[in-house]
Amino acid sequence: MKRLLLLSSGNPCRAVVAEALCKKYLNDKDGLSIVGAGENRSEKVSESALRMLEDEGIDSSQLEPRTLNDVEDDSFDLIITLCDHFKENCPIFPDATKTVHMDFPILTEEEGSCEVLFNKIKEKLIPFLNKELA
C-alpha cells in the first residue's frame, strides 16, 4: 500500500481540504492511503470549507484536523508540502522516498478564498498525483 502525506503549516484546514479532495478524485488508486496534517492543531475545519466539500459531494462529518504529532511515527512513500513554509522547514520522515513542495493559498474566511484553494488543488495537485501515482 502506498502512503501519501499532505502537509501544511499553521493552517491544518488546508491539509484537511486537500486530503478530502484527493480521496474523492484519486479513489481509483488501489492501495493508496492519504493523510493530511498541519503543524498546529485547529479545533475545527473552516465552515466555508465544509460547505464547499458538501457541494463536492464529500461527507465532511468525519473530517478533523491532524497535526505532525499525530503522524510523526508513521511512514510515507510520498510527502507533498502544501506551503512554502515547509519548503524550507520540512520535517524529516526517514522512510519517505520522495518529498515534493507545492504552494497553495491559505484558507481564510474571506469570500472566494475557499474556492481559490479548491480550484488550485483540483488544477495542480490532483493531476500531479494522477501522473506520479500512475
Image (cartoon, helix red, strand yellow):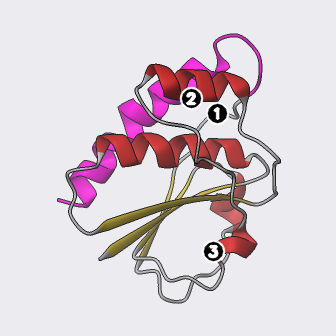
Q: Nearer the viewer, residue 108 or 28?
A: 28
What residue does disc 2 label? 117
Q: Is residue 104 left or right of residue 111?
A: left
Q: Magenta residues, as a range?
A: 108-134
Are dots 2 and 1 in contact, CB under 8 Å? yes
Q: Amino acid at mark 2?
A: Leu
Q: Is residue 126 depicted above or below 72 in this figure?
A: above
How far across and down, in percent of the image, does residue 95 sit? 48, 88
Residue at point 69% right, 72% down? 70
What residue does disc 1 label? 105
Camera-near label (3 vs 1) is 3
Q: Amino acid at mark 1?
A: Pro
What residue does disc 3 label? 71
Q: Earlier in the sequence, mark 2 or mark 3?
A: 3
Camera-near label (2 vs 3) is 3
Q: Nearer the viewer, residue 124 or 72?
A: 72
Q: Is residue 27 left or right of residue 83?
A: left
Camera-near label (2 vs 1) is 2
Real-space Cα separation, disc 2 to disc 1, in angstroms:
6 Å
Q: Earlier in the sequence, mark 3 or mark 1?
A: 3
Residue at point 82% right, 47% down? 43
* In the image, farthest residue toward the bottom: 94
Residue 124 forms part of the magenta stretch: yes
Residue 113 forms part of the magenta stretch: yes
Residue at point 55% right, 82% down? 74
SS at circle 1: loop
* Total labels drawn: 3
How far across and down, in percent of the image, does residue 114 sit? 62, 23
Real-space Cα separation, disc 3 to disc 1, in angstroms:
23 Å
